[in-house]
Image: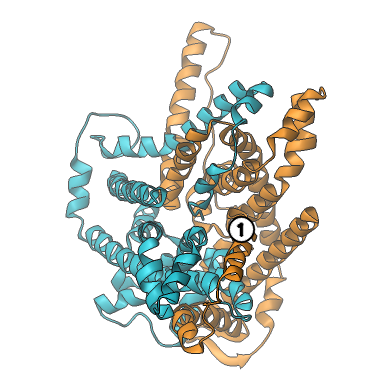
Amino acid sequence: MVSPVPLKQAAAPRARAKGVASQLQITPYLNWWLWICLAALYLPIIIMVVFSFNDSKRGVVWRGFSLRHYEAAWKNHDLLDAFGNSLIVASGTALISTALGLCAALTLERIRIRSISVYRPVLLIPLVIPEVCLGVALLVFFHMIGWHRSWPWPLALCQVLAAHVTFSLPFCTLLIRARLRQLNSELEVAARDLGATQLRAIWDVTVPLLKPALLASILMAFTLSLDDFVVSFFTATPEAQLLPVRVFSMIRFGATPQVNAVSTILLLITVVSILFAALAYQRK
Amino acid sequence: MPYEIFSDHGNSSSRADDSFLAMPDWSSRSLRVNSLIAAPHVVWLSIFVILPLCAILFISLLLPSSATTYEPRLTVSNYAQVFQEPYPAVFLFSILIAASTTIICLLIAFPLALAIAFSSERRHFFLLLAICMPFWISTLIRMYSLQEILGRQGVINKVVLGLSEFVSSMIPMLPVLDPLELIYNRIGVLIGLVYAFIPFAILPMYASLVRLDRKLIEASRDLGATFFTTARKIILPLALPGISAAATLIFIPAIGAFYVVDMLGGPEELLIGNLVQLQFHEFNNWPFGAALSVSMLICTLLVWSVTARLRAKIYG
C-alpha cells in the first residue's frame, strides 16, 4: 500500500516543470484526464454518502433527507459491538506496530551488522505476499498452537490484533525509516561524544526528532487496521467480530442503507486521521 | 523489493557513511544494545510471519479429514489435486483477469501520473493526497458503493435509460435500450479490480516520472520530435522502472481479491483467492486450501523475481 514517501519526493528540482508540459502541448488533455479520473474515483464515495441520508428502505431513488439509517445502525447491537472491537484493535495496532516499526527502522538505519541485510527481506514479507495468504497462514498458525475460537471477549481480540500488527508493521517501518534517513546522524554522534550511551542518545535525541513520523505512523496503522478486511476475515473469531467483516456479511444477506450509514462514519474517521497524518508528516 | 519502489534507494545511506567517516565512529557494535533494539520486531516477525508460513506449508502436506480438519499423515495428494480439473482453469482465469486489470490500470494511470508530475510543484501534494484518499477507505466499502452504481437499478443505468427514453421519445425510430449488464459478470469484476488497485499504478509511475530529467524532453522537442515520439522514445523508457513496479503491485493482490469477485462477479467468475477462501470457510478442507495458498504464494514469488530481474536489466 502507500506510504507518504512519494509525497515528499515532490521536492525534486523541478523549476522548469511548468514549461515542459506546455512545451509538449498536451497540458489541457492531461488536465482533463486528471479531472475525469478524480471524478470517477470520488463518484462512488459521494453516492454512498448521499444515499446514507436517503429516506427510503432500499434502492437508489432519492426520497428526501433523513437520519433513520444512522438511528437504525445505532440500535443494531451486533454492528455497534463490531465497531467497538474495530476501534480497540485499531488503537492497539497503531501503538504496537509504531513501537515495533521504530525499532525496525533504527535497526535498518543505525545498526551496522552484516546480518541485517539478510533480515531486510523478512521485514517486507507481509508487503510482498498476497493478503489472503497471510490471513490463511495466521489462521492455520493460531489453530495449530491452540490459540483459537474459545477465548472470552477481550482476549479473543488478541489474535486479530497480532494479525493486524503483522501486516501494518512494514508500512510503519518504511514511514519512520524514510524520516530517519533525512535526520542528521551527527546529532546522535554529538550526544554520544558528550557521554550519552547509545540508547540514551536514541531516546533523548532521535526519538523526539522523529515525533512527526511517529504520529503519522500511528495514524496510518490505525486506518490500515480499521479498514482491513481480508486478514480480519480469516483471523477474527465469532466472539470478536470486526466492523468490515460484519459489514461484509450484512451486504451478503441483502444490503441495507445501514451499511451506507456505518461506512460514512468509518469514512469520516479515516479521512480525519489521514489528514492529520499528512499534516504531521509534512511539518518538520 | 518494494522499498526501492517508493524511495530513492542507496544515496542517503552513502551520505550517512560520509558523516561517519569524518567523525569518530560511535555506531554501536555492542551486542547488548543492538539486540535490545533489534529483538522486538525480529521476534515478532519470526512468530507471526515465519512460523505461520511454515505452518501453512506443513498443513498443506497433511491428509485432509472431515472430522479433525487434518490427519497427521504426510502426503502430496493436495498438490496433485491442484493440477486436476477445474483448478488449472481457475488459475489461468485469475492470471488473465489480473493481467487485464494490470494493463487497464497502467493505461489509465500513465497519463494521470504524467499530469501530476508535470503540474506545478505546489499542486503535487494535494493531487497525490486526492488520489490516495479514496484508497484509504476500505476496499470492501468501495466495492459496495460500486454495486449501487453499476447495478440494474444503479445510477449509471438510471442515467443511460433515462437518456435513451428521452431520445426515443424525440426520434421514434430508436428503440429504448435494455439495462446495461455491468455487474455480476466479468465486466463488473474488471471495473471493481481496476477501481481497487489504480493507486498502486499511479504512485510508482509518478515517483519515476517526477525524477525524469526534463532537459531530455526539451531536447527532443527542440530537435523536432512530435509529442508521441517524445513519449515513446524518451518518457516511456525512463518510466519503465515505475511501470514494472506498478504492474507487480497490481498483479499480485488482484489474483487474491476474492471479495471483489464475491460482490461484483457472477457465479462463473472465480479467482485463486476465492478458491482458498471457499476451502477454508465452506468446504472445511484446510490442507487443500493450504496447498492452493502455497501455490498462489509460489506464483507470486515467481512474478516478483521475474520483474525484479527485469528491473535489474533495465537499470543495467
Residue B307 image-quadrant placement: bottom right
User: Is residue A254 something that shows in the picture?
Assistant: no
> Which residue lies at the image location 52% right of the left edge and 19% below the top edge?
B176
Rendered hue of chain A is cyan
User: Is residue B53 something that shows in the picture?
Assistant: yes
Rendered hue of chain B is orange
Answer left or right for A262 relative to B194. left
Chain name for mark 1 = B
Instruction: Give, as a three-letter code, the residue at label 1.
Output: Ile
Residue B193: image location, x then y, percent: 56, 48
Residue B204: image location, x then y, percent: 60, 48
Q: Is residue A135 above or below residue A262?
A: below
Residue A26: image location, x then y, percent: 65, 23
> Which residue lies at the image location 74% right of the left edge and 56% below the top edge?
B311
Residue B182: image location, x then y, percent: 54, 37
Q: Residue furthest bottom?
A: B72
> Which residue lies at the image location 63% right of the left edge and 85% below the top edge?
B61
Q: Which residue is mark 1?
A: B255
